[in-house]
Image: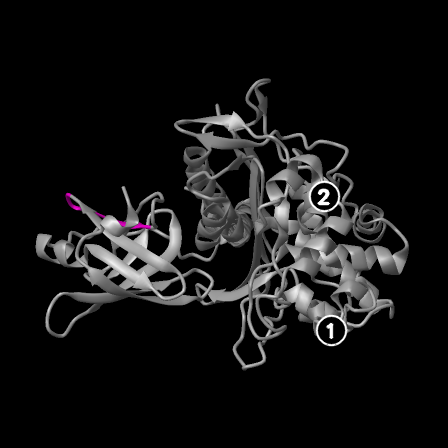
Amino acid sequence: MPRLNQGTGKYAMRIVDLGRISRYLLLGSILLLAQAARPENRIDSLRKRIDSWLRQVYPPDGPGAAIFVREQEATILRKGYGLASLQENIPITPGTSFRIGSITKQFTAAGILILVGDGDLSIDSPIDSFFPSLKDRGITIRHLLTHTSGLRNYTQAPSFLLWSQRGMSKSQLLEFLETNPQEFAPGTNWSYCDSGYFLLGLVIEEITGMSYERFVTCRIFSPLGMTHSYFGAGTLPQAKGYRVKGLTFEESKPVNQSAAYSAGALVTTIDDLARWDAALYDSRLLRSDLRSLAFSPYKLMDGKTTSYGFGWLVHRFYGEVFTEHGGIITGFECHVIRIHRRQIFIVVLSNSQNRTPSPDFVATKIASFVLGRPYEPSKKRISAGLRRDLQGSYLVPTRGIRCVEVDGERIYFKYPYGKRREMMPVDSLDYSFSFSFNRVRFVANPLGGISGFIFYGKYGEALFGAKVQDAYDLCGI
């Protein structure tokens, strides 16, 4: 038998070398493929998991949402769910435009910062020179940006329903603010205030001589290529807005956009918001020091830190700094989340209002998937005796009565005459919610029973409620 492996045959060395080379090439290919596949496999896995959950949240035959999820340069998900129009059976796509309500505020804040960068305005300028009728109020531009002006919120006024239908002039807003005293001295407290952002739009117009609509188009949308973003007074968004009515949806009557103005009248798409997010990492629009201001929580005069910067909520969650904001305007609810350290960006634009789960919850749960800490409330069993102890009415100072209701083995948290929300036990005294990132921690009485609870909100607030009776009838039926 020929001894080819020892080089005696004509083709011995070729056979041996080709064998080795083939093995090396195969091994190298496997290693390269493995390295390349790791991030792709993670992205694919995340995409499938998030998509599977969203298909349950937004059925194909009802109003839905456009969703965008990105981590660094990788787009994890860009997809539409449900219908933009129920009557015409038009599906939502990534290109569908939506009203975004108060997400408008981050663009208004950016507009102010652009003017600061241009040298036309100071953050701490008093508003007296722009609004002489509000002189001697001690309010600055910074107070308007951070909801610390103490001004009354015009969207809570009895006249707002009429304004939202017929329109609202700038003189009507100023008259409302002139005739209503401030709720607190500027810088001493925090209270969400659409009035402040309406005034900021007027400041932009006063300084530039342009309409608010033209300013955001020329100075923000056009430079960033946000070609599907606009002030929503003339052109309607592609998605129609709906609200929950019983077990179905009805089309909402749109708000006159002059009443929303620079506090909530913009229309955009998920792709344009992705362009906006990318611009917040560099100096195309804003210097780094101005971007830092926008994302820094305001500190009150007593030293307490709020959870709000300039048009953005800023707080710690899941061990990360979340910078986010929601938007609600008739028929639409939206939410955006940025996690700067991980360069994560999440958008949920929805064309239905008062729906469970909310876009805030949807966006935050998506964030939990991307961060590798998926939110899954437990359903630990609680003894009948403890359930009886938890049940009752609780008084929260400055907020009123909250109730805990027991129905069989289920435990519910309830606001007066409001919808009850089921609580899921994490342990005997610590509870989470099915469609909320709020938590409730009950306080045991050393002598037995329950003396109260601490309600922990997603944005860091903690409210104590003292138990005032064992019955829950104070919340109504």
Q: Report the residue marked by disc 2.
A: 168
Q: Residue at x 44, y 54 (%)?
A: 368
**Residue 194 against residue 301 in the figure, above or below:** above
Badge 1 element: loop
Residue closer to the observer: 96 or 98: 98
Give the extent of the magenta segment: 408-414
Q: Is residue 137 shown left or right of residue 27? A: right
User: Dot 2, how many residues are within 10 Å of its Cα: few (below 14), some (14-19), or many (20+)?
Assistant: some
Does label 1 or label 2 sit earlier along the sequence? 1
In this view, the mark in front (1 or 2): 1
Number of dots carrying numbers: 2
Residue 189 quadrant: bottom right
Q: Is residue 248 shown left or right of residue 339? A: left
Q: Give the residue type at disc 2.
A: Met
The quarter of the rendered structure image containing the C terminus is top left
Q: Residue furthest right?
A: 209
Residue closer to the observer: 86 or 284: 86
**Residue 166 against residue 104 in the figure, above or below:** above
**Residue 281 against residue 25 in the figure, above or below:** below
User: Dot 1, how many residues are within 10 Å of its Cα: few (below 14), some (14-19), or many (20+)?
Assistant: few
**Residue 350 visible to an observer of this rendering:** no
Q: Residue 194: say if magenta.
A: no
Q: Residue furthest top?
A: 88
Q: Give the residue type at disc 1.
A: Asp
Badge 2 element: loop
Q: Residue at x 15, y 54 (%)?
A: 387
Q: Residue 410: say if magenta.
A: yes
Q: Report the residue marked by disc 1.
A: 136
The main secondary structure of the magenta stretch is strand
